[in-house]
Image: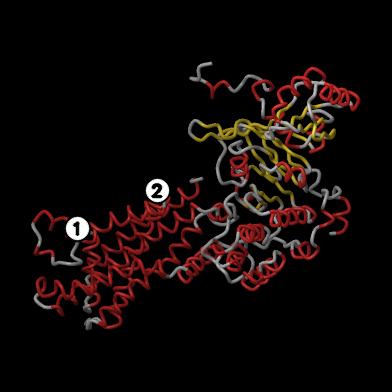
Amino acid sequence: MTGADPAIEVDGLVKTFGRTRAVDGVDLRVPGGSVYGVLGPNGAGKTTTIRVLATLIRPDAGSARVFGHDVVGEADTVRGLISLTGQLASVDEDLAGRENLVLIARLLGLSRKRARERADELLEAFGLTEAAGRLAKNYSGGMRRRLDLAASIVVTPELMFLDEPTTGLDPRSRNQVWDIVRSLRTGGSTILLCTQDLDEADQLADRIAVIDRGRVIAEGTPGRLKASVGAGALRVRLIDPDQRPRAAEIVERVLAEPHLDADPASLAVSCDDPDRATEALSALSAAGVQIADFALGQPSLDEVFLALTGRPADEGPADDGEDRAGTAA
Amino acid sequence: MSTESAQSPPPAEGADVVDPTLVAGLSRTERPRRPNPVSASLTFAWRGMLKIRHVPEQLLDVTITPVLFVVMFTYLLGGAVAGSTGEYRDFLVPGVLVMSVLFTTVYSGVALNTDLTKGVVDRFRSLPIARSAPLVGSVLGDTVRYFIAGVVIIVVGLVLGFRPDGGVEGVAAALGLVILFAFGLSWVFMTVGLLLRTPSAVMNAGFMALFPITFLSNVFVEVDTLPPVLKAFVEINPVSILATASRGLMAGDAPTTEILISLAVTAGLTLVFAPLTVRLYRTRG
């Protein structure tokens, strides 16, 4: 039903704080009923974008609409459609878990009785019944995040903002949060998920926008994004990290300039053709470079991200001059 | 429900492993009619009262100093200042009532600032409720705090032998007036709470403002004993006027002028600082 209308339309959004352009011309189209990932490093402008969309701050330029309602002119209508799970857990730490949920339920207009019932339902669903009477400040990180998510769905929102929902969580809590996101999507809500975690975006999102320095630098399905960087990649791990410079030289001659990972013994290069990959491996072997293992496959989102943001000066248009004023070349 | 899921795109990978009890718990809850501003404010007042219950030590902080003042000053200064401890006690208790309750108002600003450093305010501000509700609600909730702070001083006074001529009615009227004034003053500290960066900065600013204002008043000494310049200030200090009103009411009089001035100051503070607070709360982000 909402599938055809975009849940979020953002055009040329700009928000500056002092001299920092936190958001510098972001455009987004988020289809209704989907999980939409916004992927970017710290300070890329993800949280600022969410805060504009959640009516917490006003944009300096551009427009943002939620289900067709302007976030500035019709802020109150927008608030009736959304819920926010902020980067800082948006729970009241001096209240018990159950009190937190009853509070939100009452503020959303549920009757006293219905608010208590809804709180208990959610505590049950999120495995917090045992901890219902304990103050939220004594919760573990995972419990607090679950309480936070529960508070966000006291009334099912049309659109839910999740700002780095799994940052700092252990793997088990992270999986629980992922399950919750998937069930919400199944329930028909649209979810805007900001994350730095590439795996998370890949796992959950139907579409992803990669954002860097306040701009969207790539947009598409996870599969399309991977494909845009090259259909495949050859990854090689060496036995001896000291041989990497030599290996990089050889790979560059046979294929293309490789990407050097943080792991000092490995390198990756985009490569579509298995025959040419074999060629490169033979050349390495012939030159006496010892290979521990290798793999030919789709590039990970990690590589997509590095390819898109790691070398902005080479690839992007030369429009980032403002930041560099004063730095002698 | 089933038709809707049939036409939606296939779930993301892994959706089939979602815990079924979780999905059941996430059942769609329709949005009720939004609460009116009064109901939303009262819900926030309830939140404030829960906090008093969960963090009672905060109340202890503000009440213990005035209690010490009443007890120590009565016996330490009573003879010197008023000729007898009993006479000084009767002078001091209605004044320290004012001081104690007014100091408690600083906590309204501290609590608001503490909220802002947490994520919870973001949630409140993204809810479809009246913008003023969180603020009005927390001031209403804090009224309970002011009441407790006032009652503690009165009880200590009674224990020390304070028996005001105004009786229960007089004491209740004085307490009511002081709490009303505190309601007005708390908007000032809410504004401060929105302007300063940290809760401790709000606390310091508040106490630094209140110490001179309460000490340079007639809370502890009669105005007539002061040098002319100081006397001029003390006589127009609203805290002195409120303390005089409190003394009068407890003594069974109705000092009309002082009561009216106190009410006017309360109204003035509220009219200026309540809208300012709401505005700052809305735009701070």
- In the picture provided, is B241 more to the left or to the right than B268? left
The quarter in which the C terminus of chain A is drawn is top right
Image spot of residue A195 (x, y percent) = 67, 43
Residue A136 numbered mark, or none? none
Which residue position is annotated with label 2? B196
Q: Residue B81 location in percent, x, y?
A: 11, 71
Relative to A162, say whether A149 is above or below: below
In this picture the colour scheme is: secondary structure
Quick one: SS at disc 2? Answer: loop
- Seen at 74% across and 49% down, the residue is A190
| Quadrant of res A231 | top right
Number of other residues with Cα within 10 Å of mark 2, as a class: few under 14, some 14 to 19, many 20 or more: some
Q: Is residue A274 above or below residue A70?
A: above
Task: Please report, as a chain letter, where disc 2 is located.
Answer: B
Q: Amino acid at mark 2?
A: Leu
Observer-nearest residue: B139 or A38?
Answer: A38
- Counting residues from the start of the chain, the first of labels 1 and 2 encountered is 2
Question: At which x and y percent is residue A181?
Answer: 73, 53
Could you tell me how many numbered marks the image carries?
2
- Residue B274, x across and y down, in percent: 41, 55
- In the image: residue A210, left or right of residue B75: right
Q: Residue at x 58, y 68 (%)?
A: A99
Query: Which residue has dot 1 on it?
Result: B236
- The disc labelled 1 sits on which kind of residue? Ile
Residue shown at 72% from the left, 42% from the top: A37
- Residue B130 falls left or right of residue A130: left
